[in-house]
DNA sequence: CCTACCGATCGGTAGG
DNA sequence: CCTACCGATCGGTAGG
């Protein structure tokens, strides 16, 4: 097939995320990744340039997922409270669906090469800033505590949703929507 | 001094937490820890049994901090809502004061030796269960959304407070009490 | 608490 | 995409 190469690349990235989650970036060896995928260790280098490149691709995927969640939420409505609601739902869903890559992203950012790490740090700052603008607007509408620091409220909402990767278990029978719904009730946004 | 040994031990643990935060457990070398503290690498082994023992002590310190925060909060009052408020304040303070050790705890649990990891996992399950009982009681008093899953609400509150270690900067001029206060307003607990 | 050192293992390359 | 392999570095020990 024409996409055999792309398929195998994706399999390697999945295996890398699994190994990095289990062992950390430095502790996860290219040999273990290779054996997870069913290849020899040098074959990894046939598909990906280096161990750092594996981590970079995983991190950039999450970076893209976060941006996409925000864009999707902003497109849902012109009302900031509705946008904030949509953002919580989108983020819960992304974090739950891609639990493994998000875990690697949040634990192993320090191991990224400088250029990728600084790009991702910049994207994250912009992301937080945009969410904070939604929070300020929601405060203006009385949907969030008016006298609290927007920065803290923003990090509180993002922390609540992000932390989901640590406790959510796909076999628990809890759906992503149920999680987002409970968060929104707790935040008084429903 | 009689406590020279204990002082140096603590210095080594502090240095280890700093290095593990920067490089991860596997990536943080005993040589870098030693040079941070100003000792030779083999000297580490004079004070601590192994690299794993360094991580174990750091993790058990956090385990103790979490338990202490809960006990302190339960002792504040007999009212579950007041206990929950106190817990959020205690946790914010503990996470902010010991940001470095909490970061290592949450990122590097996977690298712990089996016995320590399973003990800590058990303590954490018990901790969450006790907080969930507070949440159920607070729901009964109408202080939290009555129809939401107690488990999700519990993880939401703990996630919000825990995540503080990722964004809080001591030089920001924001006090731990200010953080906890904003969280409590957002939760509708004040 | 240091100098000297060891076995093991890692990321990556050569050559096909 | 494999076999064979290399230089570098790691955690830990010996011996004082």
Image (spheres, coloured by chain):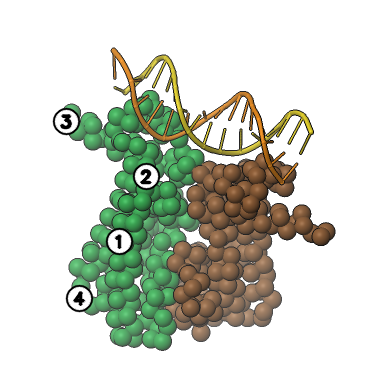
Chain colours: A brown, B green, C yellow, D orange
For disc 2, the marked residue is B55
Where does the image place residue B159, in percent across and percent down from the top left? 43, 66
- The residue pinned by badge 4 equals B78
Distance Cα–Cα, label 2 vs label 4: 36 Å
Rendered image quadrant of residue A52 = top right
Picture residue at 48% right of the left edge, 78% below the top: A173
| Residue at disc 4, secondary structure | loop
Point out the frontmost of discs 1 and 4.
1
Judge if badges 4 and 3 mark residues of a common chain: yes
Looking at the image, which residue is at 44% across and 40% down? B19
Give the class, few, some or many, for how many residues have Cα within 10 Å of label 2's Cα (few <14, many ≥20).
many
| Residue in front for this viewpoint, A162 or A73 | A162
Calculate the distance from the C-alpha at mark 1 to the C-alpha at mark 4: 23 Å
The residue most toward the right is A2
Q: Is residue B99 visible?
A: no
Chain letter of disc 1 in the image: B
Q: Check if mark 2 and mark 1 are on a common chain.
A: yes
Residue at label 1? Answer: B123
Q: If you read the primary sequence from the N terminus, does the residue marked by circle 4 or circle 3 appear first?
A: 3
**Residue A159: image x %, image y %?**
48, 65
Numbered circle sitting on residue B2: 3
The residue marked by circle 2 belongs to what chain? B
Up the image or down, B148 lies above or below B75; here it is below
Q: Which mark is in front, 2 or 3?
A: 2
Query: Residue at the location (38% across, 73% down)?
Result: B154
Callout 4: 10 Å neighbours few (<14), some, many (20+)?
Answer: few
């Amino acid at each position: 097939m024409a996409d055999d190469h792309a398929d195998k690349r994706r399999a390697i990235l999945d295996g890398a995320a699994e190994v990095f989650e289990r062992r950390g970036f430095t502790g996860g060896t290219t040999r273990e990744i290779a054996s997870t995928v069913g290849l020899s260790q040098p074959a990894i280098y046939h598909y990906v340039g280096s161990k750092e490149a594996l981590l970079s691709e995983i991190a950039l995927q999450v970076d893209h997922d976060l941006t996409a969640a925000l864009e999707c939420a902003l497109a849902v409505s012109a009302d900031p409270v509705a946008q904030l609601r949509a953002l919580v739902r989108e983020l819960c869903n992304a974090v739950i669906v891609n639990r493994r890559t998000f875990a690697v992203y949040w634990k192993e950012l320090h191991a990224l090469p400088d250029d990728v790490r600084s790009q991702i740090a910049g994207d994250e700052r912009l992301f937080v800033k945009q969410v904070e603008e939604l929070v300020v607007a929601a405060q203006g509408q009385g949907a969030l505590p008016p006298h609290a620091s927007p920065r803290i409220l923003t990090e509180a909402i993002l922390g609540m949703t992000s932390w989901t990767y640590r406790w959510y278990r796909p076999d628990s029978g809890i759906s992503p929507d149920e999680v987002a719904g409970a968060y929104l009730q707790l935040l008084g946004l429903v």
